[in-house]
Image (tube, rainbow, N blue to C red):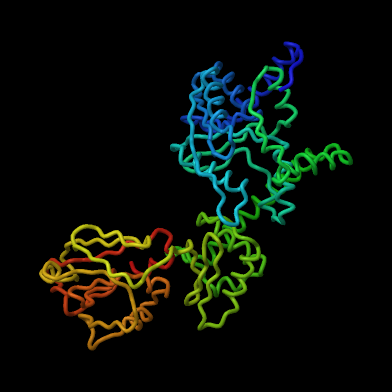
Amino acid sequence: MRGGYWPPQLILALMSLFTATLTSILDRQPPAPRYWIAYSGGIDSQVLLHACSELKARRPDLDFAAVHVHHGLQAAAEQWAEFCEASCRELGIQYRLLRVNAAAKPGQSPEEAARSARYQALRALLSEGEVVLTAQHRDDQAETLLLQLFRGAGIAGLAAMPERADFGPGFLMRPFLTFSRAQLCEYAESHGLAWIEDPSNLDLRFDRNFIRHEVIPLLEKRWPSTKDALARTARHCAEAQALLDSLAENLLKSVLHPERNTLDLDRLRTYSQPDGRLILREWLRSRGFRMPSTRVIDRALDEALSARPDRNPTIRWSEGEIRRYRGELFLMPVAPPFHPHEIIPWDGISTLRLPDQNGDLSVTHEKRAGISREAWRSGTITVRYRQGGERMRLPSRDGSHELKKLFQEAGIPPWIRERTPLVYIDNELASVAGLWLSDSYAGKPDDTNVVIRWRAPDGFSGATFLS
């Protein structure tokens, strides 16, 4: 923190500029029940906290609170949290501390892990309509564009950070995007603010720091207006991306099976490869998946469209998988490990939560086709999974039928078949949950019978075939 004399007129001018900008941006949006200031204690968020406290003095109708995310990555993290709490107390701003686990997963950078943990915690904090305010500025915009450019990002990655974006049940707003880092420093110094200096911000092993301290200063020696030009380019990319988003949304509708959220391959084949990439990315985005690499997108298109009709390729990446089956593409999270040989006892009364995150089984008693209540009460009930060779007699059909052929006739995808619970009574197959009943245990249709329901795991694409 640097000292020095600041004329009162300049201090007042800076204060008016920042609070006027903040007021204008907040007033352009519907009022929020609360504005959460994302407060690290660094110089940028310290300026945002101070400006919000000044605005609150003039606009008591605005409910500001600060939230500090404790990543636990620095030895001084506890002292930083205490500093932030003391700063908020001094300014009369409510303070909230959130502790997160920011350990990096395999293949994830420390920066990415910390950001992901922080944003996840902030989303969970918000109630309906609340807003998170961050202190990102014009220099951050320029750094982000270069960072994405060096990673080979497309237009979406190069697009400017928006002033306002959907965020969990509320919104995220960046009121300082028109200000430079130098202007924030002037504000902080002129008001005698204290802030935290995070030593990791000087560590050139981190890409953003290398760009900030090495790359941009070198560019500015040749092109002094580098940051302004990069920010302008980011805005142009954002405008182009908005047009692409609208196009992608319409293209996706033309190939989407609305009930199953799957893609129709025959329709997808009518589009060019660039349009196909656009459709796949919009499909992933609309389902809440983090975007995989271009390599994964191209592989999905190639294998899905060119594999022989009797093949069912699967394209996996760290967060999800795309599967092809009977002319459709299915999207789902990576399935957890599964143990198909386990025999699970069930009392037949309470809801049974299945191991391996395989959903749950429940029963109701209804006047419709189902298992006889007498058989249900008198037998020993267990739940198992396919081992191969299972057969059953159906009430409405002659003969004994292979379970494999019943699944195929019904068009049940293979990944659903292997996880569909089989309900046994006294070691005899009585029901394939949600699908078929054994003639041996079926009650009379006019009687009140036991109806078994399987609630498949969330995001288990293809489970709609069971309904």
- The quadrant of the image that shows the N terminus is top right
Q: Determine the image quadrant of residue 166.
A: top right
The structure residue drawn at horizontal position 73% and vertical position 43%, both measured from the top left corner, is: 204
- The quadrant of the image that shows the C terminus is bottom left
Query: In the rendered image of this protein, does residue 384 appear above or below residue 392?
Result: above
Q: Which x, y percent locates residue 466?
A: 34, 69
Furthest-right residue in view? 222
Q: Would residue 217 appear left or right of 443 to someone viewing this image?
A: right
Q: Would residue 53 appear left or right of 401 to someone viewing this image?
A: right
How many labels were placed on the picture?
A: 0
State the residue in front, 456 or 448: 456
Q: Determine the image quadrant of residue 440.
A: bottom left
Furthest-front residue in view? 75
The structure residue drawn at horizontal position 48% and vertical position 61%, both measured from the top left corner, is: 333
State the residue in front, 418 or 343: 343
Q: Which x, y percent locates residue 360?
A: 30, 60
Q: Would residue 138 appear left or right of 61 to someone viewing this image?
A: right
